[in-house]
Image: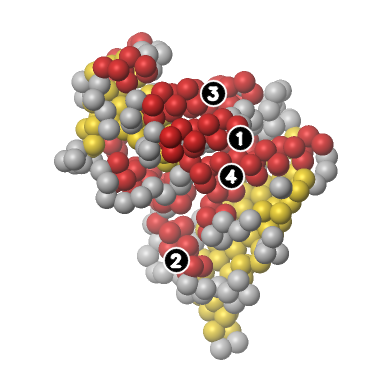
Amino acid sequence: MEKARVGIVGLGWVAQVFHLPLLTKFPDTEVVAVCDKDKSRVRMIADRFGVPTTYYDYEQMLSSEELDAVIVCTSTDAHLPVTLASLKAGKDVFVEKPIARHYDEAVQMAEAAKLYRRKLMVGMNNRFRPDTMILKSFIEKGELGKIFYSKAGWLRKLSNDNPWITRKDKSGGGVFLDLGIVMLDLNLWMMDFPPVERVSATMHRHKTKSVEDSCLAFIHMKNGATLVLEVSWSLQSAEDFFYCDFFGADGSAMINPLRIHKQLHGNLVNVTPAKIETPFNLHKKSYENELKHFIGAVRGLHTVISTGEEAVHRMKIVEAIYESAHKGKEIRLR
């Protein structure tokens, strides 16, 4: 195909700030329709980005438009029905993180992609940051030796952009499904998805009622490596930040900012590439690279990264973390 014909369902902040500004400028993409239940919002955003057709019902959009792909940016509770309907209609699907509220919903979505032989990609934009891709290449080449320990965290004040995110029926969970799953995915991807043996976690509610606003998790791999995660909407920090540190037998590295140190002739040497972009550019580039990758997959140029199957694997770990926090004990994964 010369251009991928795309429809977007859900016009919240991520669609307005990243998806639409980027996709409408891609030369190989045509955004032919947008859909949202808020009628005034959908008309305003369609006008702003020059999208010709608007819908308030995604099923009507699927039956009326000739689309190659659907991008799902709705609240998490709608990910399952919109994705299943889109796959059944013969469309490839990009769905923002997390794939679903629960493990069983993720399984249904991944199985539907196989059944209808369509591509299903889950938004994990931090894999597509230029600095994380550089570090991934260092780790894959064995420059740091075997990674035996990593720690990561994301502390960010709760935003008003998505008020539904603190409603468990809509979101499925709190800060761990919002921020924790991103850091979990980034670490597992960096380490080439080592099988997880057991997890333990604690969760707290300081400013939320039905979901957690802070979580600390310990994740032990079958290969002996350990991952520690901390995420919070409510930790009393002077500023928002995220970090991701890796420690190997022959070196160490961190992200945000990128730093890579390697043992050479008995000395720890800084081998970080010289050119480092600003945090804002890295964040913007991550979405741009991610969406370019998805459109390329839709056009048949390559296979999908961050598949539905990988998301199912992540959700199994996520559910074990929630179970550990609820029961107050370590959980072993089957």
Q: Provide the residue designation for mark 1.
A: 103
Q: Are marks 2 and 1 in contact (CB under 8 Å)?
A: no
Q: Helix, strand, or loop for circle 4?
A: helix
Question: Which residue is most to the top?
Answer: 39
Q: Residue at x 51, y 67 (%)?
A: 139
Q: Earlier in the sequence, mark 2 or mark 1?
A: 1
Q: Provide the residue designation for mark 4.
A: 314
| Direction from residue 98 to residue 117 in the image, left or right | left
Is 303 rendered above or below residue 92? Answer: below
Location of the N terminus (image quadrant): top left
Q: Earlier in the sequence, mark 1 or mark 4?
A: 1
Q: Is residue 24 visible?
A: no
What distance separates the C-alpha of mark 1 from that of mark 4? Answer: 9 Å
The amino acid pointed to by label 1 is: Tyr
| Direction from residue 259 to residue 157 in the image, left or right | right
Q: Earlier in the sequence, mark 1 or mark 3?
A: 3
Q: Helix, strand, or loop for circle 2?
A: helix
What distance separates the C-alpha of mark 1 from that of mark 3? Answer: 13 Å
Q: Provide the residue designation for mark 3.
A: 77
Q: Residue at x 56, y 56 (%)?
A: 193
**How busy is the neighbourhood of tag 4: few (under 14 within 10 Å), some, or many (20 plus)?**
many
Q: Quadrant of residue 60?
A: top left
Q: Provide the residue designation for mark 2.
A: 137
**How busy is the neighbourhood of tag 1: few (under 14 within 10 Å), some, or many (20 plus)?**
some
The amino acid pointed to by label 3 is: Asp
Is 282 rendered above or below residue 15? Answer: below
Q: Position of residue 304 (x, y in %)?
A: 38, 47
Q: Earlier in the sequence, mark 4 or mark 3?
A: 3
Q: Earlier in the sequence, mark 2 or mark 3?
A: 3
What distance separates the C-alpha of mark 2 from that of mark 3? Answer: 35 Å
Q: Quadrant of residue 105?
A: top right
Looking at the rendered image, the disc whose residue lies closer to the viewer, 1 or 3, is 1
